[in-house]
Image (cartoon, helix red, strand yellow):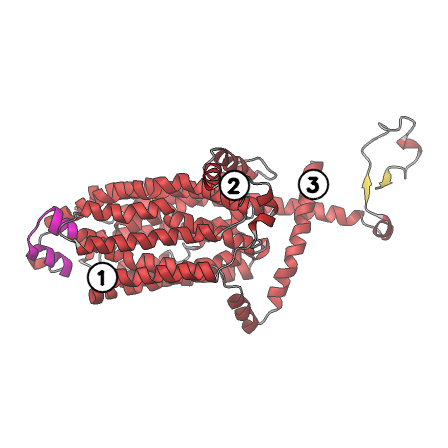
Amino acid sequence: MKHLSQSTKDKVSMTEEVDKEHEQWQKLNLNSRIKYIVKNITVEPLLAFFIVSSVLGNLTTQNLNLQKSCRVNLNMSDAVCTALEKRNRANYTTEQEAKVQELVTNMTMWQSVIQHTIPCIFVIFIGSWSDRTRRRKPILLLPVFGELVRVLGLIVCVFYFYELPMEVAGLVESLPSSLTGGWMIMFMAVFTYISDMTTVKMRTLRIGVLNLSLTIGISFGVALSGILFQKLGFYGIYSICSTMYFMGILYGIFILRDPSNKEVSTSVDCQNSKITAHQSICTNIREFFDLKHIKNAFGVTFKKGHDNRRLRIIMMMLVLMIIMGPMTGEMSVMYLSARIRFNWDEVDFSIFSTFTMATGFIGTSVSLWIFSHKLQMDDALIAAMSCLSKFVGSFVFAFAPNPYIFYLGPIVEIIHGAGSIATRSIYTKLVNPDELGQVSAVVGVFEAFVPLIYVPMYSAFYKATMKTFPGAYFLLGGGLTVPAIFIFLWMYTGNKARAALENEWKNNDATQVTPDSIKTGKLYVSEKNGIENPDFHPDECTNVDQTIY
């Protein structure tokens, strides 16, 4: 209990330090805050190039797979395939649409395994290396290189459209992203970078701003994807994507800086590391892939700590999977289901996706600014509210009889995006700054299992219900979200109890401080009871039990 009290005092001291920056932020006017945000822009442009390009090309690649499935693999007539593209139901049947989609959903299952198995292993070594060398830039740039190679490969698949079947395009789409980490490594690197650059007090707001930037980037890419595909076709979209990836690489190399010292060899972490500039490349590679780093990463992440640190981190990993799982699974089949349910084409779907992102942007902004910043609500309570909105919204999506009701779904679950923000903020506050890379890597491993589990599950579920109840997969997501609500409520009650205990300890410490103690030092009650001095008798003197150290 005494040790726990000292730990709490340390946390209170740290909070008082970071509160100074928070108080300075509160005193700034709107113009000064905008200048502050612009001045502190770091990784956002690189993330914007990456996200916009990925989202912009995603719908195009889905259409490429559908066209190859129809024209190359199934060898359907040109009239039928053209009617499928133009959404002209007079010239094709629902059965033909189902055959094309079944082939694509089957490929999606094994694509998901390829895309996320390698990063699942790779992310641990990357995170450990980043912590030991204090370098974040290489991790940020690696996925961008992989995406550039992927897009160039898809251009080749378009050029040899009839010579290369759908499966080849699927491999080209999967392998480069898998070997370089893709979205998983990018998000791990981005959130680790932001955590390095911000204080604990400002981290929720800073991560929230990053997520809003992410939402804007996705919305921008989704809004343009359908229209640009109809106007520019495969070559136009992939050319734009490759150009943006290249611009992101240039920004990362010449403008973005590491949050640590520029010279890695001067870093304390690097001095303790075996990876140095004086070792050979082979030695550095062996050290990079040393299995001890997996053990160290898991050891750091799941080590015991005060206030149930290990249990809370495990719970945060679990809820991240619960929150991200339905989102990932739904997006993998939503375009296909919208084609069957409402006869949508790529433009209709891009308009709906843009509306979804816009409402999510508004909801996330409100939840961050009002709930977190103004009302100072606990992160766990905000996350519980977001999961509840997702649960209710799933029924609207599933049973929507027409597009108008379907558009109500994003409004009902308007604050759902706050869940992942709050969860990431919670777990970054549970670890030390020098552990963020390794912990983020282990979290990334668990996140890697999300598409591995949910995408095949949703694809198989959608394939089974495609002809009878194509919106049933939304109910699956709503049901899977329920456990997260109870976990966040458990976190919230625990946080309230800890806050009350900290206030009690703080008040007890304040009552011990007197004018004399301020001059001579802090007083504490001796617990020796004469053990060191056998002649000491506490009953003989009432003031001897106060000792100055």
- In front: label 2 or label 1: 2
Q: Nearer the viewer, mark 1 or mark 3?
A: 1
Tell me if residue 76 is in the magenta stretch: yes
Q: CA distance from mark 2 to mark 3?
A: 45 Å
Q: Are marks 1 and 3 in contact (CB under 8 Å)?
A: no
- The residue at which mark 2 appears reads as 279
Question: Is residue 71 on the magenta stretch?
Answer: yes
Q: How far, Cα to Cα, is label 1 from label 3?
A: 64 Å
Q: Is residue 469 visible?
A: no
Q: Is residue 27 above or below residue 4?
A: below
Q: Which residues are magenta?
A: 68-86
Residue at image location 45% in from the left, 58% down from the top? 253
Badge 1 crowding class, 10 Å Cα cut-off, few under 14, some 14 to 19, many 20 or more, is some
Q: Which residue is mark 1?
A: 235
Given contact means CB atoms under 8 Å apart, are the residues at marks 2 and 3 in contact? no
From the viewer's perspective, is 433 left or right of 526?
A: left
Can you see residue 145? yes
x, y percentage for residue 356?
33, 60
Q: Main secondary structure of the magenta part?
A: helix
The type of residue carrying mark 1 is Tyr
- Of mark 2 and mark 3, the one earlier in the sequence is 3
Tell which residue pokes out farthest to the top in this image.
534
Q: Which mark's residue is nearer the viewer, 2 or 3? A: 2
Residue at 7 percent across and 59 percent down: it is 90
Return the residue at label 3: 5
Three-letter code, disc 2: Gln
Helix, strand or loop under label 2:
loop
Q: Residue 342 or 38: which is nearer the viewer?
A: 38
